[in-house]
Image (cartoon, rainbow, N blue to C red):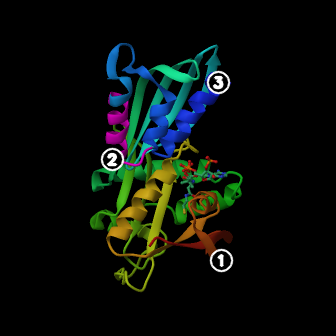
Amino acid sequence: MNQSPEQVVQAQLDAFNAHDVDALCRIYADDACQYQHPATLLARGTAAIRERFANRFAQSQPRARLLRRTVLGDTVIDHEYVFSGTTRVELMGLYEVKDGRIANASFVFGPTVQVRTATFDDLPAMEALIARSGIALSKGFYTDEQAAAVTRHVFGVDTQLLKDGTYFVIERDGTLLACGGWSKRATLFGADRMKADADPLLDPATQPGRIRAFFVDPSVPRQGLGTMLIGHCEAEAAQAGFTALEMAATMPGVPLYRSVGYQSVEEFEIDLPGSVKVPLARMRKAIA
Ligand SMILES: CC(C)(COP(=O)(O)OP(=O)(O)OC[C@H]1O[C@@H](n2cnc3c(N)ncnc32)[C@H](O)[C@@H]1OP(=O)(O)O)[C@@H](O)C(=O)NCCC(=O)NCCS
């Protein structure tokens, strides 16, 4: 018995995420068409669809995340984010299923968000985002007093990372949505105002690099932006020869870091002005 339209489209999503071109070609009908909505033909027939997927997977390792699925008879509409390296594209895929295979697929491409290296010109926007993020996204993890103290006294940009080219932003149409970076230097956390001394370089062969100052705008939490940034930082740090990364994670940061494989190696508190104590966790991950 044929699979339901929903099962067919789910199988297509699974095969896409497994980068399995053969499975995708079995799921699409032999004469299937792919369009960019409304009528731009992207591929017709198995050979063209095979070539399109093979090229796509040769260029990057995309991963689609389903946001919402609507099923109406033989038609299935998926709203997705597709993450590939330093970009995330939002799209709608409309699939017509006949006899257990996809007969036609039509895609509407939405906004792209992109990681790029931060510059000194980004500083005002990053500092404003960090202040918003530190207060709003600490809720449920820190008291209001702790969130205010850590945002005021600890959070912010360490401009050494801007000089080193290891701090990044994610933007959409010129609007900053997130920032974060890694460091080849000893400082574990804190903005410029916490630094007094020179910040010595670490030895990648024997010391872990740092993950530093991750912040997502409170209007776009849980959309995979933190994960995108950390993937980019890990790739860059590995390219610089580091085999492990470490950080002082805030409590709101712990679930993100844990979800991408960091483990807590020490829990400690920092004392901030006003006798406010703020718990942090030192976390670590091997990246090679
Ligand atoms: C920590 C922070 C950067 C996470 O960014 P984000 O873009 O929302 O994270 P992601 O969407 O990539 O989350 C990936 C996974 O982490 C976990 N996670 C992230 N935020 C979480 C939360 N508030 N509660 C529970 N789990 C959470 C989930 O497993 C999530 O996957 P899911 O949404 O599919 O369940 C963001 O919450 C933030 O800016 N916090 C305030 C500033 C801060 O404390 N930064 C950390 C400094 S060390």
Badge 2 is on which residue?
58
Badge 3 is on which residue?
2
Q: Position of residue 273 (x, y in %)?
A: 61, 70
Q: Position of residue 17 (x, y in %)?
A: 50, 43
Sequence-first disc among 3 and 2: 3
- What is the quadrant of the N terminus in the image? top right
Q: What amino acid does circle 1 point to?
A: Phe
Nearer to the camera, 59 or 144: 59
Q: Is residue 53 magenta?
A: yes
Looking at the rendered structure, the secondary structure element under dot 3 is: loop
Q: Position of residue 218 (x, y in %)?
A: 56, 43
- Look at the image and give the residue range highlighted in magenta: 48-62
Q: Is residue 61 visible?
A: yes
Q: Nearer the viewer, mark 3 or mark 2?
A: 3
Alpha carbon separation for disc pair 3 and 2: 31 Å
Disc 3 packing (10 Å; few <14; some 14–19; many ≥20): few
- What is the quadrant of the C terminus in the image? bottom left
Could you tell me which residue is drawn at 38 percent across and 13 percent down? 38
Sequence-first disc among 2 and 1: 2
Alpha carbon separation for disc pair 2 and 1: 44 Å
Q: What amino acid does circle 2 point to?
A: Ala
Q: Is residue 279 above or below residue 19?
A: below
Badge 1 is on which residue?
268
Task: From the viewer's perspective, tell me whether residue 36 is left or right of residue 133.
Answer: left
